[in-house]
Image (tube, rainbow, N blue to C red):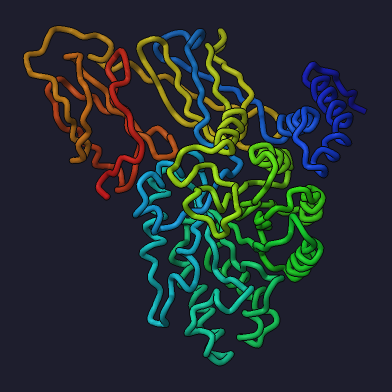
Amino acid sequence: MQKSRITPESLKSCAKLALLLMLLPTWANSQANGKLDSNFIKASNVKIETIRKRDGKLIVTNPNGSAGNLKVSIKQIRNHFGFGASIGYDQLTTVPGYAESFLKYYEWAVFENDMKWPSTDPTPNGPNYTKADSLIRFCKKNDIKVRGHNLFWNQKEEWYPPWTLSLDSTAFKAAVDKRINDAMNHFKGRVEHWDIVNEPIHGTVLQDHSGDPNIINSIFTRSRVIDSSVKLGVNDFNILVWNSADDYVNRIKSMLAAKVPVDIVGCEGHLGNNLNQDYAANLEKVATLGLPIWVTEMDFSTTGDTADEFERLMRTFFSHPKVDGVMMWVWWGGNKWRDDLNSNVVNTDFSQTALGDRFLKLRKEWSTLDSGRTDASGSFTFRGFHGKYVVTISDGSIIQTDTLYLEPGTGSKEWRMSLPKPVVGIGNPGPAVAAAPAKTLLIEGMPVTFSREENMPLTVSLFETNGKYLGTRIVQPGQTKVAWPSLPRGYYRYRIRSAHRVLKEGMGFNLRD
């Protein structure tokens, strides 16, 4: 029998587990009683440390010399956990400040109405995805992931195109099948999730109009055939509060038993003024399904400390191993479906609320920023939250930037990175050049204006919107154009720098689109 070896790491793990067991009763009582106290925070932090973070090791090689003592900086630019909110085409295109405010707080988007069947198919003459496509372009440009919402909404007839309600059962099923084919094919590869049937336990519109009691199962199966990569989900309300959790779990269990491809369980977070209810207990009921949980459409009204209530919610969800994301529904004071809701991070004029202050504080607490130097062997270790990082390594004159992804898993994740060989002219000003320095540079015809002080070569580096490094071009003094013909049309990040500093960088640069 192999003997276990006691290590400092195992002792730390035991200590964390012991602390967690000591604090769990107090944590549960604090959650149920609606309190945000120090014991609740400590207990949630222990769980978060275990389930949301991982060790990483960067191994650097340097063709220019020693790999030791190289400067390393890592900055998290996306969290693996989904922090998102709803957006709408009309607000995005007509309200100044709306887009900028959304991007300040969120990394995932769900469209409030613009992908729903009545919005895309108001007549039987074919779908119109103009608004939804515009929102997806905005999200792609800004590295925002999208949840598709929704393919069908089962609760009430008013959530269906009016023309479908007068069809006989055969024609209605044909319309349903066309909706599946049109939408699933059109958005294939463009959304991460699809709420295939919204509110399946609170209505029977699909069953009633089709005459088919198993139509929901068929819709899931058909959707999977069309798009095998997207995550298919159900979504319903009164799950975390009130009394629908048991019915919801039983319904999903029956679908799974019938081999229906359900990948994600959505629990609508329309919590109203019911934050004193033990939503953690209902969350545990849903967790017994073993599927990833997304808290969707979250908003609430409370007469207590709104920021404390919000932090208690977020800590409950972020410290739960089955919850993969939280999507806010009401986040802007200018768009509320009920006047009493106060879950917004910004007011109507986009000034930040106390809840917004708290949210950014939590986002900062739950992200990783680190720096240091490689050891003698060229290694740099860190512990960080799961997600996407921009990593920069430098030996003082040569700089390399790329992205790394620290996904959930066991053990330490390793990456290998290498400094490039030096480019002649970079890092050495050389003799003065008579030509006047250009202040506007055309990158594949797209103008970028910047302050150029040094009369010496510059570098232009391009990255995908998610931060992945694509390459670097040299720009000589007086040169006004740089070509990148191998890149496809779309959106990119760019960075223009001299040997001494970054002159300009930007995100969402539109290249030949």
Does residue 70 appear to the left or right of 17 in the view shown? left
- Residue situated in front as seen by the camera: 509 or 404: 509
Residue 4, position in %: x, y?
A: 88, 23
- In the displayed structure, 93 sits above or below 306; it is below
Q: Residue at x 63, y 61 (%)?
A: 233
Tell me the quarter of the picture where residue 240 sits. bottom right
Residue at the right extreme of this rendering:
1
Residue 459, position in %: x, y?
A: 27, 23
Q: Residue at x 62, y 79 (%)?
A: 206
Q: Residue at x 54, y 42 (%)?
A: 345
Q: Residue at x 44, y 15 (%)?
A: 62
Q: Is residue 431 visible?
A: yes
Does residue 298 appear to the left or right of 92 in the view shown? right
How many numbered circles are shown? 0
Residue 275, position in %: x, y?
A: 73, 49
- In the displayed structure, 143 sits above or below 383; it is below
- Residue situated in front as seen by the camera: 458 or 345: 345
Quadrant for the N terminus, please. top right
Does residue 212 appear to the left or right of 490 in the view shown? right
Q: Is residue 264 visible?
A: no
- In the displayed structure, 31 sits above or below 204; it is above
Residue at the bottom extreme of this rendering:
168
Residue 51, position in %: x, y?
A: 72, 35
- Residue situated in front as seen by the camera: 457 or 504: 504
- In the displayed structure, 301 sits above or below 123; it is above
Does residue 273 appear to the left or right of 494 in the view shown? right
Tell me the quarter of the picture where residue 243 sits. bottom right
Tell me the quarter of the picture where residue 248 sits. bottom right
